[in-house]
């Protein structure tokens, strides 16, 4: 089973506001996790969570899954359902998702709209969008602060909608010792091992998990003409002022 220790989940819920910054490179091994947990690349592993925002009680569900593998790379998919509308983002990763440079392809499906694949020249923009989506729902924005410390608090039994689990409880503290987040980890819950987590902004609880995931995007995606938020005035689909790349300049 492939695993990336303390990975940043670039997972991410699709086409939704968030604030997970793009990382230029993977953080040191002892850095607190961007997503609370460990990312396993076992094909078929999936988990679905109930997400509740503390302010206002807004609710949604989030489903994370590893849905395929090609060579040493794999397809990672996140689906967010909110207000009866499901948005999906599917990413082809060549390595540790802690590094957004490893996102090689991006396919998106917004509600009932046809699935669209982002052209290679817009993948960098897509990386920002993808990494932006997840953090609001995971609560992991707390790890953007400096001088944080992650601690294991021991094992216990917890009950969530998906059942009862033996977990290792963890917490993240700031430089003053204030607890910013807690998360409960069980390695058998694929792909991240998260049973529940809580910050002052959001709480997530596991509602279902399994090992039989397949992609929820069943149709062949069409190529996107312009990235989300960009006007289609330019017939070539490039934002105004975007110069053509030098040979080999895209997809690095």
Image: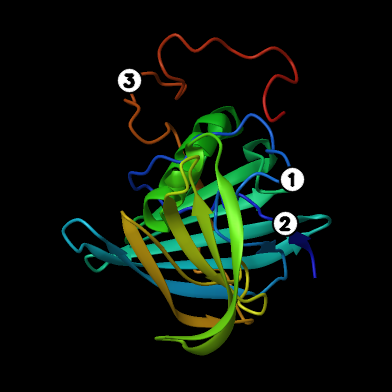
The tag earlier along the polypeptide, 3 or 2, is 2
Left or right: 36 as drawn, with respect to 59: right
Q: Are marks 3 and 2 in contact (CB under 8 Å)?
A: no
Quickly name the residue at label 2: 5
Given the current orientation, which residue lies at the most extreme right position?
A: 71
Callout 3 secondary element: loop
| Gap between marks 3 and 2 measured at Cα | 44 Å
Distance of mark 1 from mark 3, alpha carbons? 45 Å
Taking depth in this image into account, of 171 and 186 the one nearest to the observer is: 171
Tell me: residue 45, above or below residue 227.
Answer: below
- Quadrant of residue 156 within the rendered picture: bottom right
Name the foreground residue: 113 vs 1. 1
Residue 237 can be seen, yes or no: yes
**Disc number lying in front (1 or 3):** 1
Q: Is residue 223 visible?
A: no
Crowding at mark 1 (Cα within 10 Å: few <14, some 14-19, many 20+): few
The label shown at residue 233 is 3
Mark 1 and mark 3 in contact? Answer it, CB < 8 Å.
no
Q: Position of residue 9 (x, y in %)?
A: 57, 52
Q: Residue at x 70, y 19 (%)?
A: 249
Is 15 positioned to the left or the right of 127 in the image?
A: left
Quadrant of the rendering where the N terminus is positioned: bottom right
Q: Position of residue 49 (x, y in %)?
A: 42, 72
Q: Quadrant of the C terminus?
A: top right
User: Is 239 located above or below residue 69 in the figure?
Assistant: above
Res 202 label: none
CB-based contact (under 8 Å), mark 2 and mark 1: yes
Task: Name the residue tied to disc 1.
Answer: 29
In primary-sequence order, the first of circles 1 and 3 is 1
Using the image, determine if residue 59 lies above or below residue 212: above
Comparing labels 3 and 2, the label whose residue is closer to the camera: 2
């Amino acid at each position: 089973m492939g695993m990336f220790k303390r990975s940043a989940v670039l997972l991410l819920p699709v086409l939704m506001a968030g604030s997970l910054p793009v990382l230029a490179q993977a953080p040191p091994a002892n850095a607190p996790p961007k997503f609370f947990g460990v990312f396993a690349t076992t094909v078929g592993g999936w988990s679905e969570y109930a997400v509740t925002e503390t302010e206002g009680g807004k609710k949604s569900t989030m489903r994370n899954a590893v849905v395929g593998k090609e060579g040493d790379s794999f397809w990672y998919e996140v689906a967010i359902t909110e207000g009866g509308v499901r948005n999906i983002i599917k990413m082809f990763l060549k390595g540790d998702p802690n590094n957004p440079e490893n996102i090689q392809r991006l396919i998106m499906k917004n509600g009932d709209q046809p699935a669209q694949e982002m052209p290679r020249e817009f993948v960098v923009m897509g990386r920002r969008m993808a990494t932006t989506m997840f953090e609001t729902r995971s609560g992991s924005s707390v790890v953007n602060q400096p001088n944080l410390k992650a601690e294991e608090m021991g094992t216990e039994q917890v009950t969530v909608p998906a059942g009862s689990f033996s977990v290792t409880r963890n917490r993240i503290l700031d430089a003053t010792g204030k607890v910013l987040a807690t998360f409960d980890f069980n390695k058998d819950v694929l792909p991240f091992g998260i049973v529940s987590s809580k910050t002052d902004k959001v709480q997530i609880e596991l509602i279902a998990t399994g090992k039989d995931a397949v992609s929820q995007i069943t149709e062949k995606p069409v190529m996107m003409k312009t990235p989300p938020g960009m006007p289609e005035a330019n017939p070539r689909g490039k934002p105004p002022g975007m110069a053509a790349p030098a040979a080999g300049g895209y997809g690095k």
